[in-house]
């Protein structure tokens, strides 16, 4: 097997470490996020063995995580049946100093937010590029906003007026037309200036009030901890109380 790139290795390290530290034997209902870091989360969960996983149920945040759960031989469940989760682990597009996150680069943030909110503990895993002081520093695409298709044109106009002149409908790559989410909605990417992104909870509140907005990819005050795989093989951990630690030689 070829050696993973630095970034893939960092994602794997963060995911493995978070699973090792947070998925406890007593945890039965677990939310699985979406994105390119999450396959490593599932890989590490599967590696805990059939015995550890036999009484567990895993809830997906979208088509991708559903496939990962099924392919991993894990038991699939849904939020309809299990409304209280022990733990949700998910990736992020960027995380700020207060653990506010931009999520939705893969258009999964509505379901991700439902499972993050329903969980006793929500943990974020990412590589070092996502570890920021202020949102929008590295992730320039904008805040992902899932909107009902009927309202998108009007919402674009409103978003451009309230501080995001470059707000744009997300277009599909291998299909003519817009990205359609797992919920049948569209996504607008709305880049905001630093003045707005310095206060993500206020921006979230403003955006959620707009008619036609289904969910905003700003996760504020939700994560208990964020794990960032570093280039040097260490993992930086930031907690919701402001404390930090670094784990050397993690995820072996
Ligand atoms: O909609 C997608 C999700 O919010 C992902 O968790 C986020 O985009 C991060 O994905 P990745 O781990 O691929 O950077």
Image (cartoon, rainbow, N blue to C red):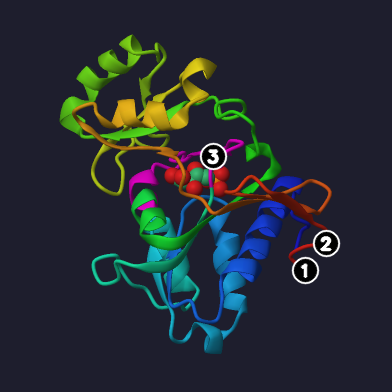
Note whether 161 is above or below 45 in the view shown: above
Tag 3 residue = 93
Please identify the quadrant where the C terminus is shown: bottom right
Span of residues in magenta: 92-112
In primary-sequence order, the first of circles 2 and 3 is 3
Look at the numbered disc 2 and say if its residue's Cβ is closer than 8 Å to ligand 1.
Answer: no
**What is the C-alpha distance between the residues marked 3 and 1?**
25 Å
Q: Position of residue 78 (x, y in %)?
A: 30, 67
Tag 1 residue = 252
Please identify the quadrant where the N terminus is shown: bottom right
Note whether 109 is above or below 59 in the view shown: above
Tag 2 residue = 249
Q: How many residues crowd around disc 2 within 10 Å: few (fewer than 14), some, or many (20 or more)?
A: few
Instruction: Please indicate, yes or no, whether residue 162 appears anywhere in the rendered image.
Output: yes
Q: Is residue 88 left or right of residue 131?
A: left
Note whether 153 is above or below 60 in the view shown: above
Per the image, is 105 magenta?
yes
Instruction: Please indicate, yes or no, whether residue 124 appears anywhere in the rendered image.
Output: no
**In the image, farthest residue toward the bottom:** 51
Q: Are marks 1 and 2 in contact (CB under 8 Å)?
A: yes
Q: Nearer the viewer, residue 169 or 226?
A: 226
Q: Position of residue 52 (x, y in %)?
A: 54, 85
Note whether 187 is above or below 83 in the view shown: above
Secondary element at tag 2: loop
Secondary element at tag 3: loop
In primary-sequence order, the first of circles 3 and 1 is 3
Look at the numbered disc 3 and say if its residue's Cβ is closer than 8 Å to ligand 1.
Answer: yes
């Amino acid at each position: 097997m070829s050696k993973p790139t630095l970034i893939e290795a960092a994602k794997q390290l963060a995911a493995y470490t978070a699973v090792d530290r947070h998925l406890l034997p007593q945890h039965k209902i677990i939310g699985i996020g979406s994105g390119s870091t999450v396959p490593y989360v599932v890989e590490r969960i599967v590696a805990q063995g059939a015995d550890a996983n036999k009484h567990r149920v895993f809830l997906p945040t979208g088509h991708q995580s559903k496939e990962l759960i099924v392919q991993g031989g894990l038991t699939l469940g849904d939020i309809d049946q299990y409304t209280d989760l022990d733990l949700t682990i998910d990736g992020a597009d960027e995380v700020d100093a207060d653990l506010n996150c931009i999520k939705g680069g893969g258009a999964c943030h509505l379901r991700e937010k439902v499972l993050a909110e329903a969980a006793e503990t929500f943990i974020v895993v990412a590589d070092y590029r996502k570890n920021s002081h202020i949102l929008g520093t590295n992730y320039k695409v904008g805040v992902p906003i899932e909107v009902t298709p009927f309202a998108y044109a009007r919402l674009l106009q409103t978003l451009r007026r309230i501080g995001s002149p470059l707000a744009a409908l997300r277009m599909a790559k291998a299909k003519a037309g817009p990205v359609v989410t797992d919920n049948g909605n569209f996504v607008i990417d709305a880049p905001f200036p630093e003045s707005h992104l310095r206060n993500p909870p206020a921006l979230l509140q403003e955006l959620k009030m707009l008619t036609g907005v289904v969910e905003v990819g700003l996760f504020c005050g939700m994560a208990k901890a964020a794990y960032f795989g570093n280039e040097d093989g260490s993992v930086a951990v930031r907690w919701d109380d402001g404390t930090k630690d670094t784990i050397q030689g993690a995820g072996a």
